[in-house]
Amino acid sequence: QVQLVESGGGLVQAGGSLRLSCAASGRTLSGYHTGWFRQAPGKEREFVAAITWFDSSSTYYADSVKGRFTIARDNAKNTVDLQMNNLNPEDTAVYYCAIHRSGSFFVRGNYDYWGQGTQVTVSA
């Protein structure tokens, strides 16, 4: 059984930055692709970013965060981080990390394990 724990959320002003971290316990993240999703109040959970397990340079981003967010894997720490820059109020949401072995990175139904989420609030 894999347990995922997100950390690093908080309150930040528009234009600021936050770094989220997804830590795995129970097993290594090796062999799993990792994705970040977010869910704002009253909205569906949406894809944010993903990284493959076999090539850390293979990354994918939602258009809304491209150029502002960066996903990166730290194999030594068994974590996947999401660096979020130039945040705006539309980025306010609960952010979740998730892992899966196969299928589209963009479809949340393909992910096997999820963390409990961390709140990110961006004030205007």
Image: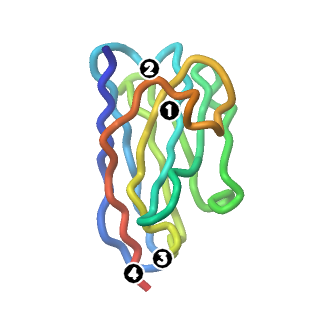
Taking 93 as reference, is 12 above or below it?
Answer: below
Residue type at mark 3 is: Pro
Circle 3 residue: 89
Mark 4 / mark 3, whichever is N-terminal: 3
| The one of 58 and 91 positioned closer to us in this rendering | 91
| Residue at figure coordinates x 63%, y 37% from the top left | 107
Calculate the distance from the C-alpha at mark 1 to the C-alpha at mark 3: 26 Å
Element at label 3 = helix
| Residue at figure coordinates x 50%, y 59% from the top left | 84
Q: Residues within 10 Å of mark 4 (few under 14, many from 20)?
A: some
- Cβ–Cβ under 8 Å for marks 1 and 2: yes
Taking 35 as reference, is 46 above or below it?
Answer: below
Mark 4 / mark 2, whichever is N-terminal: 2
Disc number for residue 73: 1
Q: Residues within 10 Å of mark 2 (few under 14, many from 20)?
A: many
Residue type at mark 4 is: Ser
Q: Using residue 20 as the reference point, say whether residue 107 is left or right of it.
A: right
Calculate the distance from the C-alpha at mark 1 to the C-alpha at mark 2: 9 Å
Q: Tell me where residue 61 appears, x and y as whole percent.
A: 66, 48
